[in-house]
Image: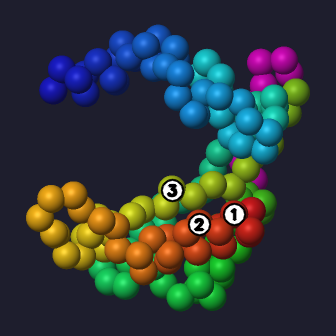
Amino acid sequence: ASTARAARSGEFSSAMASENTPLRQAQKGRVYIEGEVYKKDGQEIVLMGGNYVFKAAPYYPPLDVVRQNAKAMVEGAQKMAYKPPPAADGSPRPVLPCVRLGAMMEGAYPSRPMGSPVVDANFAAKLEATMKVFQEEG
């Protein structure tokens, strides 16, 4: 309870802002966090999108369905009327489509072997293919 209260109050913000994680390291073409702002290639951006998760087998639909869903999400982001406030320097902040892709652990580890678990190769391949389709569609 105290952890949740601290997160709501912003108590963690200064500690999280100083973390050296991949999300805080600028790389060309990648989204990263600078202070409390999302950026891509040095420009402040706004990420908008949705969740994509299937909570039962086969865990990821056929790729043609994934592609249709990805296109619909991108089109929705492009058609929306929301205009974010400008960046700190006054420049416009573009809205970029994004997806929070869920991965169900019972799909990744369908058999729970003794010792070190191994990710199911078929599940891993479907996850990679799904990520690629979302990347290709924007």
- Please give the range of residues in magenta: 81-90
Counting the numbered discs, the total is 3
Q: Amino acid at mark 2?
A: Met
Q: Which mark is residue 135?
A: 1
Q: Are marks 1 and 2 in contact (CB under 8 Å)?
A: yes
Q: Residue at x 68, y 40 (%)?
A: 31
Q: Quadrant of residue 129?
A: bottom right
| Nearer to us in this view, 126 or 75 | 126
Instruction: Name the residue located 71 percent from the left edge and 30 percent from the top edge.
Output: 26
Quadrant of the image occupied by residue 35: top right
- Measuring from the top left, give residue 108's x and y in whole percent: 33, 69
Instruction: Out of 125 and 138, give the one closest to the viewer.
Output: 125
Q: CA distance from mark 1 to mark 2?
A: 6 Å
The image position of residue 66, as x and y in percent, is: 58, 79
Dot 2: what SS?
helix
Residue beneath disc 2: 131
- SS type, badge 3: strand
Q: Amino acid at mark 1?
A: Gln
| Residue visible at 72% across and 43% down in the picture | 30
Q: Would residue 89 be visible to someone looking at this image? A: yes
- Calculate the distance from the C-alpha at mark 2 to the C-alpha at mark 3: 10 Å
Above or below for 81 versus 12: below
